[in-house]
Image (spheres, rainbow, N blue to C red):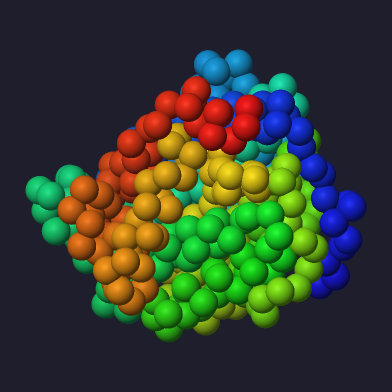
Amino acid sequence: MRLRQDDTIEVKTPAQLAMMRDAGLVTAAALRAAVAAVEPGVSTAELDAIAEREIRAAGAIPSFLGYHGYPATICTSVNDQIVHGIPRPDQVLCAGDVISVDCGAIVDGWHGDSAVTVRVTESLPYASPGQPGPDDQQDDVAGLLTACENALWHGLAQAVPGRRLTDISHAIEGAAKAAGPYGIIREYTGHGIGTRMHMDPPVPNYGRAGRGPALSAGMTLAIEPMLVLGRPHTMVLDDDWTVVTTDGSWAAHFEHTVAITDDGPWVLTSEDGGAAGFARLRAGRRAGQDDRRGPIAGDTAVGNTAAGNTAAAAMASAGGAATGTASEGARHGL
Ligand code: MF3
Ligand code: CO
C-alpha cells in the first residue's frame, strides 16, 4: 500500500473540527440507540430503523445509505461477519451471538463514523455472567471484544501531532498481539474522514512504527481494528458487501473518529471526547497490568463494561462520564 504525502490529507480548522464534533455526537447517539436495542429476538433491520430515526431526528443524514449503493443506515455484522453486514428483517439475534454495529452520519457536510461490537445477552452483566457461545470454539468471545476495544484505544492514543501514521497502526497491532493469539484483519483498514467518509490516508491495523505521513493538528481519522478468533482471511458474500472470515471464526470490530489536536486526541464519536477510554488505558498502565487482562481490569468504576460484553455495558463504557461540550471545546481551543 502506498501512503501518500500529508499534503493530500484534509486539515480542518478549529471551527471545522467543531462541526465534525457535531457529526460525531449524532453518530454516537444513533449508535447508542441501536446498540441499546440489541437483545435476543430483535432483527438487524429493526436496529437499522432505530439508527436512521435517531439520525434524521437530529436533522442529519445517514452517510452509509446509498454509499456505492449500500442499502442501509448501519452495518450489522454478526458472528463470523467482520464488517459491512447488511441489516435484514430475517436476521434475528440469538443470545450468545456477537454483533458489530457500525454507524455514520453527516452534519453540515461533515462525517462521523463509529462502530462497537457487543455480545447478545438476555440481561445485564451484574445480573448474570452472560451466556457462553453456542459453540465451544467461540468461548473466547469476551476476550476478543476486550482485546479489540483495547487495541482501538491504544491506536487512538497515538493520534497526536508529531507522530507518524503507522505509529497508530503499530500500537494497534502491539496491543492486539499482547492480548492473545487473535487474527488481525489486514484487508480492511481505517481511513481519513472529513468532507467524505473515506479519505486519505488509509490507516492499517498492523505494521512498523515511524512510517507514513506525519500527523498534524486538524487531521481527522477513523480508526477501526478488526480482530478474529481464527485466521485473518476474509471473503465477501454474494450480496457484494458482507465480509466474513473464511474459517467461520467470530470477529470483533470497534471504531472511533478522532481529531488530532495540539491538546491531544479528541475522540469525536465518544460523548466524553475520549476521557474515560484514555483513563482506562492509563489505569491499566499504572497498575502494571498486562494487556491480556484488558485496560479496565480492576477498575471498579467502569470495570465489567467491555469485559461484560453486553450492549448496555459497552455503551456505558463508550459514553463514560460526560465532561460537557463547553469545557471540552475550550480544551481543544475552540
Ligand atoms: N466504518 C465502515 C468503513 O469505514 C463503514 C462502511 S459504510 C458502507 O468501512 F456503506 F460502506 F458500508
Ligand atoms: Co470506517
With respect to residue 81, does 321 lie above or below?
above
Left or right, 110 with respect to 105, comes to right
In depth, the one of 190 and 169 nearer the eye is 169
Q: How many marks?
A: 0
Residue 110 appears in the figure:
no
Please give the name of the residue rendered at 34% of the width and 40% of the height, measured from the top-left corner: 320
Q: Quadrant of the C terminus?
A: top right
> Residue 213, percent across and down?
80, 63
- In the displayed structure image, the side of residue 193 where residue 319 appears, left or right: left
Q: Is residue 237 above or below residue 88?
A: below
> Percent x, y for residue 96?
28, 59
Quadrant location, the N terminus: bottom right
Q: Position of residue 109 (x, y in %)?
A: 75, 27
Inspect this view and state whether residue 159 appears. Answer: yes
> Which residue is found at the position 58% from the left and 44% from the top?
263
Tell me which residue sits at (21%, 48%) in the image.
301
